[in-house]
Image (cartoon, rainbow, N blue to C red):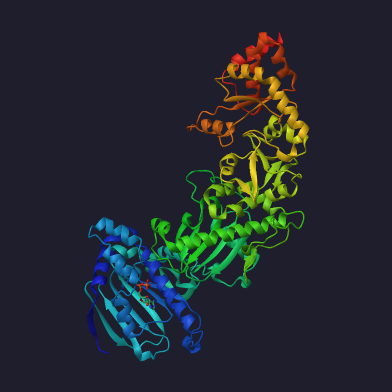
Amino acid sequence: MSKQTLSFQAEVAQLLHLVTHSLYSNQEIFLRELISNASDACDKLRFEALDHPELYEDAPNLEVRVSFDKKARTLTIADNGIGMSQQEAIDHLGTIAKSGTKDFMSRLTGDQKADAQLIGQFGVGFYSGFIVADKITVESRRAGLKPEEGVRWVSGGAGDFEVETITRAQRGTSVTLHLREDAEEYLNAWKLKQVIGKYSDHISLPILMEKEEWKEGEDNKGGEMVPTGEWEPVNKASALWTRPKKDITDEQYIDFYKSITHDQEAALAWSHNRVEGSTEYTQLLYIPAKAPYDLWNRDHKGGVKLYVKRVFIMDEAEALLPGYLRFVRGVVDSADLPLNVSRELLQESRDVKAIREGSTKRVLSMLEDLAKKAAPAPAADADGVTDVTDKKEEGEAEAPNAGESGKYATFYAEFGSVLKEGLGEDFGNRERIAKLLRFASTTSDAVTVSFADYKARMKEGQEAIYYITADTLAAAKNSPQLEVFKKKGIEVLLMTDRVDEWALNYLHDFDGTPLQSVAKGAVDLGKLQDEEEKKAAEQAAESFKPVLDKLKEALKDKAEDVRITTRLVDSPACLVVQDHGMSMQLARMLKQAGQQAPEVKPVLEVNAEHPLVKKLESDTAHFDDLANILFDQALLAEGGLPADPAAYVRRVNALLV
Ligand code: ADP
């Protein structure tokens, strides 16, 4: 084939114009795009060579070489991948075959600023070379073709390009950029290494550059760096996640974790897998041992690194995991997303949704594994059924098993409260999340009791999982609402995390057993109460009615209602809220945080057996003071403050005197 001049397809011309005019602010991406193409070409060769090993010819080591010529002002990116035939060069570099491109072009508005934004979200690939070059020369030979069947493609990036046949001994492609004057900074090894390090460190092939050394000028005047003819890799060339799991040691996994997180401590666990199917991606996800200092900061993004075909796209791609798993670190490498995908685009992508669901499942099973190893006894799942997702997939790599038992506790202490957010955020996985939660309880100060443990210890006839929320463990433990439960030996979960109250709103039962706050609604111990107790309570309510009515009147501004209770043993009174009402504690918390909270009017419950309450019947002179003291004390006991502390003190002092 002699030299021919061909026109670009109309869309290409349009795209080229756009590239050269709009991508100026982000010049350096051209290198990422061209190295990515070179790496793809090597991947393709590797794939075809599976069936045709002769395609490797005598150069089985796939690599990319980046070199420059200061005098000629050229930068060359050369690979020994699959290469292009003449027709392929015409087709691939002269037309746009990708279906997405047409769609993309149709969305262009003609407004340069808006279009520049659009193009930023779209892989411009090869044509990005024209951001920095006013002419590009491509020389290529497809693997398997004869040396005489090489091709040279040259274009100035305007309306047309030239192609001609050349003889090219080596297979693969070299792309030579004739740099514009304002792109001369890329004629500098240091600059190139920096850009390569930024975007292509995890390209699995070596990217080589020629070693340079300093040469003094004549008579010690000036001097310059000159090439030595020796090539050295400038990227780490270690896309760890692309290697087979069996070839990766625990130490390598941990080193990689440290390198991407700058965390000094090893991760607690990791999960590395390749997912195939309609959405293809590889994930290597880690559970850190320590929360970052800004985990609770609203601006903390979290999330994992996103790569597309081993090319780094962005850090903290929070769209790849739900918010309650924002502590997870690692890498997701997608085979489907476009290289220039933006954060906005990520939010909408179907592929990303699939990745998020897959990654969530993966993280939950990692946590389930850690939790299992922490269990003192060989604990069966609460329902005796093992989730299918618990099973290790073939070839899955997991963190080592030694010394595992403390890991879940470590994880939970650092991230348990974040995980709880999942109850409200991820309905689909609510049950799995609930199983992972741990609490202190009236039988364990340590935060180790799971709902399943609790259920296994429930009393005969007990129909609910009881819990109480409070600011501190001490306040929870000494809460008057617990008295009857203590007396009857019924365990109550003690919840002291700020997020508990909110999170528990979303969990009404666990494995069929309802959850019941002991500070909400009337206590109904159901079958746990014997007939005699029930009768005694009814009688007390009857004979106490006149006093109750007086109490209601005296406290009508403070209490929604006043009633006799059986939940108290030693205390005279306590406050509860209506069954679905906001707890006093949450209302206080919201107020402290400066947020709107509904005025919670609690119910005052009194213990008719208590001497102080009995006194109400006889001491009519001090009735009002006593009533108010009862109410305010109940408020104090649960960590609140009387509305008028001075009045409270005055009343108590009056009685003391
Ligand atoms: P994309 O890589 O997204 O398909 P590009 O515009 O970057 O789009 O490249 C267009 C096509 O040109 C590629 O799909 C590939 O077939 C071919 N190509 C580009 N660079 C190379 C290369 N270094 N070796 C072989 N083929 C290449």
Specify the quadrant that holds the C terminus.
top right
Q: Residue 642: give x, y in percent of width and height.
A: 59, 21
Relative to 396, residue 416 above or below: above
Most foreground residue, 69 or 336:
336
Q: Nearer the viewer, residue 67 or 626?
A: 626
Relative depth, front residue between 601 and 171: 601
Q: Please state the horizontal and vertical placement of residue 450, each as a whole percent of the image.
A: 69, 49
Q: Which of the four quarters of the rendered structure image does ligand 1 lie in?
A: bottom left
Query: Which residue shows up at 65% across the image and 17% down it?
Result: 546
Residue 270 visible to an observer of this rendering: yes
Q: Is residue 409 left or right of residue 68?
A: right
Query: Is 486 positioned to the left or the right of 513 in the image?
Result: right
Res. 74 visible in picture:
no
Q: Position of residue 305 (x, y in %)?
A: 49, 59
> Compared with residue 576, is residue 360 higher up or lower down, i.e. above or below?
below
The image quarter in which residue 265 lies = bottom right
For residue 91, side relative to residue 311 (left or right): left
Residue 360 figure quarter: bottom right
Quadrant occupied by the N terminus: bottom left
**Residue at 34% of width from left, 81% of height from top?**
139
Label total for image: 0
Indicate the quadrant where residue 108 lies.
bottom left
User: Residue 460 placed where, x, y %?
Assistant: 76, 45
Classify 652 as above or below 113.
above
